[in-house]
Image: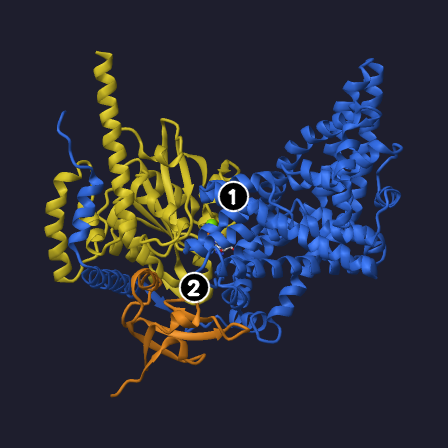
Chain colours: A blue, B orange, C yellow
Amino acid sequence: MGTLNPTHTSFLSGIDQEITPQEKQEMRDSIVGSIYSCAEAIAERVINHEQNYKSELDRKIDNVVTSRLLGIPIMLALLGAVLWLTVTGANYPSQALAALLFRIQDQLTTLFTLAGAPAWLHGVLVLGMYRGLAWVVSVMLPPMAIFFPLFTLLEDLGYLPRVAFNLDRCFKKACAHGKQALTMCMGFGCNAAGVISCRIIESPRERLIAILTNNFVPCNGRFPTLITLSMIFMGGLAASAYGAAAATAVVVSLVLVGVMITLLISWLLSKTILKGVPSFFTLELPPYRKPKVGSILIRSLLDRTIFVLGRAVMVAAPAGAVTWILANIYIGDMSVIAHLAGWLDPFGRLLGLDGIILMAFILGLPANEIVLPIMIMSYLSSGTMLELDSLHALRALLADNGWTWLTALCMMLFSLLHYPCGTTILTIYKETKSIKWTVLSVLMPLGTAILITLIAAQLASLF
Amino acid sequence: MLQTIIPLSRLPNGAAGRVASLSARGLIRRHLLDLGLVTGARVEAIRRSPAGDPAAFNIKGALIALRNEDADRILIAID
Amino acid sequence: MESTSQLFGLNPLPDQLVVALAGNPNTGKSTVFNALTGLNQHTGNWPGKTVLRAEGSFMHRDKKILLVDLPGTYSLLATSADEQTARDFICLGRPQATVVVADATCLERNLNLALQVMEISSRVVVCVNLMDEARRRGIRVDVEALSSELGAPCIATAARDGLGLDKLKDAILDMAAGITDTSPRQVSYEPHVEQAAAQLEARIRPFLPGWANCRWVALRLLEGDSGIIRAICSSLDDDSEKVFLKEGAAAWAR
Ligand SMILES: Nc1nc2c(ncn2[C@@H]2O[C@H](COP(=O)(O)OP(=O)(O)O)[C@@H](O)[C@H]2O)c(=O)[nH]1
Ligand SMILES: [Mg+2]
């Protein structure tokens, strides 16, 4: 002990500096060449091609899905199909689940009454926590259980890289990276996952752009809001095939708006604070593989559905309790919620929303999935208690509170754009290790959301 | 025999050639080498995306998409 | 010596063998991983296409194995953050064995990675996956011959259908437990490269005590792979710092 060795860093980097870049490049060319020729030699000795196979089927599929004419329409059609299946398929189980869960609520209430529990305890636990949970589960579980397996199927088939291939030109125009399309696909599942997946982008500048804009693809926590509202206000409750199609079309258009905003903001960022030219881009288009349906079902249900739902439940329970408490503590003759909502109301009206909706977005910061439930609970707390076991009841509730299709549209736009959820913000901080970028990742979408809803609301009020 | 040398970006779909040299430097060069674009490696142009750029190439058995300006930096000797 | 795996946030049980799963993208790493670990897995990040890494455990012949699924890479000379995760783990995490999952339908590209991994570690098992797909395309891979060419056990599998996995488990366990003798094939470089590498190796060897593969480090220095050099340095500096701290603590105790 006692000798102060120079650190390894300075020793090795000293050697590193002795070698010129030109020498390094020659060495590297030679080294990589040798490894590849060794690999080639081995492969030649152990492989025996029995017939000259060409992956005809792969080529045929690619000819269609990346064709000039059909490439983009097929992409949209697939997105539409996935969403349509989700919308139509989720409708019935959602209602059945809601009915079941609210029946349990009644039984819990009876139990509490029998046990002689105080009203506030019943309020916090049953009307707050349990009801928040029941909402989240019945609204989110069915669409997720349909959406995730379908999405995993597309992923496993090898289709997603083709999306990136088709769209790369747009991203290049926006000075962004083609793989950003892949990170956006991941964002459909969960924005936090989308942000992490930005690691596949080599260039730090383009990776940052992808991270900052990932929020503009609606994640699974927001899809139920979009789907529910479009079913109620645009799809005529999706009772008919026509209604479901209309609702799907609305959600697809919203996704497209999100994509366009992503491209626009990426371009703006590239021209302002993240200046630079596109770096290089390579993307493997893997062969199509027949997926194993059983394991897709298990994995997407276990990993994704339960994962997302679990997270939602963890946040929804306390948020439900908080909402109930806020709705039941009175200052003067108004509850805290009413005060808050009243205070936010003028600004909300400007954006085509109202105070309660804005408050729900603020309280819903920890997780997007609870925005709708908080909003509903707040409406319920100020009105008569009705049994919300169907979309009809929800429509009646919203209409009672002055909703029109414009309110729904503005809420959907705001939900699409507003800001990343708490988990995602944390993830952005972990990935960028910078407060500055994290703050920007919140403020930039918020500004965008306010601007767009403002424009939409004001335009509509002109007519 | 005289060989024609063209940038990879100009290789028409269905045509093939061998890597003659890379004019890319630094990180891009590393990345291209790692993908198997070593001197002498066979490359076949397979398809182009709807907008014509990027294009996908068969490089040692994998289908890999490159943007035009990157493919420009790979010089190909046509068989 | 304490396991370097801990640097990577892994906490293997004392009797658990750490095994890394590497390979090019889309070779079926995650499929192999799922097939081996079943539901005994934990993913630190979003599951699905591997972005971070997933870890899972399984038992084979009464031995516990901790399996780590790494993101796919074409080579160890990584450029993206996600490839770095894989590379750093193989280079510095010192798993007891590394499984290279290779795609039988384009072996050459996959052997490129396998050869690179074998330059770092002698405890490598090659899993030649997608054998069913290769057969369908009329490609026959002589796995025996491949094993002797590489000097490392090669196991044919079709992970999606669960074929060959028992043999793979045997091979992994034998390798991780140190039962298998290996003499991994080393790539021979052009004479001027070999010469320069040998000279540099002799120079750096005294400064890298306990680092098994100075030739490999020398080659990376020659080609100026600054990323990996930085990673090695910081891990070495960490190590010596730890030694230093330990000595300090021991001195205090006295
Ligand atoms: N035919 C066949 N397909 C496989 C096999 N192993 C994996 N796959 C498929 O190959 C695709 C990619 O597998 P994945 O495990 O995600 O690869 P990774 O990127 O290396 O993790 C999936 O669609 C799998 O179902 C196999 O042995 N045979
Ligand atoms: Mg994987």
- Examine the rendered structure and indicate whether residue A149 appears above or below residue B15: above
Q: Secondary structure at mark 2?
A: loop
Which of the labelled discs sits on residue A277, or is there none? 2
Q: What amino acid is at disc 1?
A: Thr
Residue C177: x %, y % from top left: 30, 35
Residue in front for this viewpoint, C203 or C47:
C203
Residue in front for this viewpoint, A363 or A314:
A363
Residue A358: x %, y % from top left: 72, 41
Residue in front for this viewpoint, A404 or C57:
A404
- Label 2 marks which chain's residue? A
Q: Does residue C61 appear in this view? A: no
Residue at 49% of width from left, 37% of height from top? C41
Q: What amino acid is at disc 2?
A: Val
Residue that carries the numbered disc 1 in the rendered image:
A438
User: Residue A331, located in which quarter of the rendered image?
Assistant: top right
Instruction: Specify the quadrant that holds the N terminus of chain A.
Output: top left
Marks counted in the figure total 2
Residue at 34% of width from left, 64% of height from top? B32
- Examine the rendered structure and indicate whether residue A359 appears above or below residue B55: above
Q: Secondary structure at mark 1?
A: helix
Instruction: Specify the quadrant that holds the C terminus of chain A.
Output: bottom right
- Examine the rendered structure and indicate whether residue A397 appears above or below residue A173: above
Residue in front for this viewpoint, A376 or A392:
A376
Residue C249: x %, y % from top left: 25, 18
Asked if labels 1 and 2 share a chain, the reply is: yes
